Structures are given as C-alpha cells and as structure tokens.
Amino acid sequence: MKKRSLRDRVFRYVKEKYGAEAEYPWFRYPDYAVFRHEDSRKWYCLVMNLPKSRLGLSSDEEADILNLKVDDLLLRDLLIRQDGFFPGYHISRGNWISVLLDGTVRFEEIAALIDRSYRATASQRKKQDLRPPKEWIVPANPKYYDIVHAFDGAEEILWKQGKGIKAGDTVFLYVAEPVSAVLFRCAVTETGIPWRHEDGELTIRALMKIRLEKRYPPELFTFRRLNDEFAIYAVRGPRGIPQSLSEALKQ
C-alpha cells in the first residue's frame, strides 16, 4: 500500500459523497487538510501527518491520521481501545478521535466514521435533514376538521405540520374525543407547504401532505389502551412513540 493511498481515498470519498474540497489553512503545516460543512463552516475531518511516536507508538515513522468527531462517548471509548484508534490528537474539546491511515483500520470502517462525524458536527437544520425516518403520533381534533371521514374520497390530504416532522416520516393520527383512538397510519410525502391561519384557537404556520397507508378500527388503539399498555398519558401535540407501540401498530 502506498503511503498516501488511504489519505487520497478519504479525500475522494468526501468529495464524491459531500461535494467538499480539502482546505489547507496552516502555512506552517502545508499538508494538514480540513473538510468543513458549507453552512456552519465546522470541521468534520482533519487530516494530519506526524511521527507515530506522538501518538504513543514506539516508532518515529511518519504517518497520516484522520481526526473525527464521535457523538457517542461509549463508542469513542470502545474505539480508542482498538488498534489504529487514539484520543483526538491536539483536539482536547469534544469527543474526537484520531485514526491511523496506514492500513491498520479498514477503509469501510473509516468511511462510516466520516459519515458519523459529518452528522455529529452538522448544524441543527442539517441534522434534521440527515436524521433517519421517524414515527410520530399526531393529534387530530374533530372540532376543527372532520378527520374521521378525511380519507373517504382521497388517499392523500393536507394536514397541519408539526415541528420536527419531515418527508419520509410516518404519522399515526390520534382522533380526539369523542373517538379517542388512533385511526390512521400515514406516510409524510411533503412538508413546508406555506399556509397561514389563526383564529384564536387554532394556529397554522405550514402544512404537510400525508398519504393514507392503513386504517385502524376505533376500538383497537383507544386512549385507555395507549395509557395502560404504552404509557402515553396525553396526546396534545406531535410526539415520538415507544418501540412497543410501534410494533403493535405494525401488526
């Protein structure tokens, strides 16, 4: 393996996946390269070359290292016990690690950690875009909208968008009294649809488009069952759901 082959492979990976070019901000260290988020300008990769002895190894051979952020302290502690991983060199704040780019660590593992560092250092807005699909339980009040019959003539409708919900998520519509039960499972197909409504009782700032995937009998997922079996004591706004309820809703 050529000395710079893994370094070059890292550069190609970041450019192809994230469209980022390396920056060389230090005149004194011309080979030190950083990759930043376009919006926040935060680093997610820092490539350095230095003697292995600075990492505590018994060798003065020069090696490339890759500094990455790991947002899970337990994972970080597990990694730095393995060959090729070290506490972040010259980065004392945050959960940073240094990875040897000499073949000790497989590139596939390095690539996965680059992705993790990218997510860990992203802005809140970008983290929202990057997060995996999520399941929500969303209240629907028949007082404002005839939700019970909303899907009688259409498979897709517009609904008030809850904070944090994005396209690709799943929403379970809980219909308030007098129904008091989950009636529908829907896929969120579009969000951020501009809408302004305020009448003193109901305020809407944006709409989302939801597509019906499944109907539930009103006696199946009642409020009493949500309370007794799944520890859901109120549905006043969009909220995530426990794994046990997710599994039950999918049966």
Image: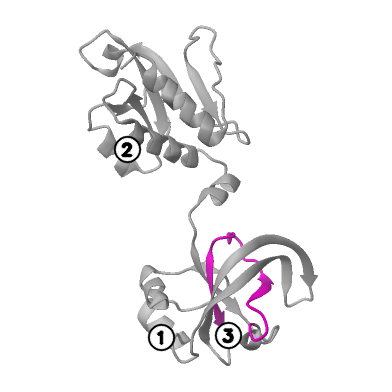
Which image quarter: residue 203?
Answer: bottom right
The 10 Å Cα crowd at callout 3, few under 14, some 14 to 19, many 20 or more, is: some
Q: Is residue 237 above or below residue 130?
A: below
Is any part of residue 43 visible from this angle?
Answer: no
Is any part of residue 195 visible from this angle?
Answer: yes
Amino acid found under the numbered disc labelled 3: Ala
Query: Badge 1 is on which residue?
Result: 225
Q: Secondary structure at mark 3?
A: loop
The part of the chain drawn in magenta is: 151-174
Q: Is residue 46 above or below residue 137?
A: above
Quadrant showing the N terminus: top left
Amino acid found under the numbered disc labelled 2: Arg
Alpha carbons under labels 2 and 3: distance apart: 45 Å
Alpha carbons under labels 2 and 1: distance apart: 40 Å
Name the foreground residue: 122 vs 108: 108
Image x and y of residue 82, in percent: 23, 32
Image x and y of residue 21, in percent: 56, 24
The 10 Å Cα crowd at callout 1, few under 14, some 14 to 19, many 20 or more, is: some
Magenta run includes residue 162? yes
For the point 54% across and 16% down, which residue is it?
Answer: 24
For the point 45% across and 69% down, which residue is it?
Answer: 241
Query: Badge 3 is on which residue?
Result: 176
- Disc 2 or 1, which lies upstream in sequence? 2
Q: Is residue 185 left or right of residue 111?
A: right
Alpha carbons under labels 3 and 1: distance apart: 14 Å
Amino acid found under the numbered disc labelled 1: Arg
Magenta run includes residue 36? no
Q: Is residue 118 above or below residue 139?
A: above
- Disc 3 or 1, which lies upstream in sequence? 3
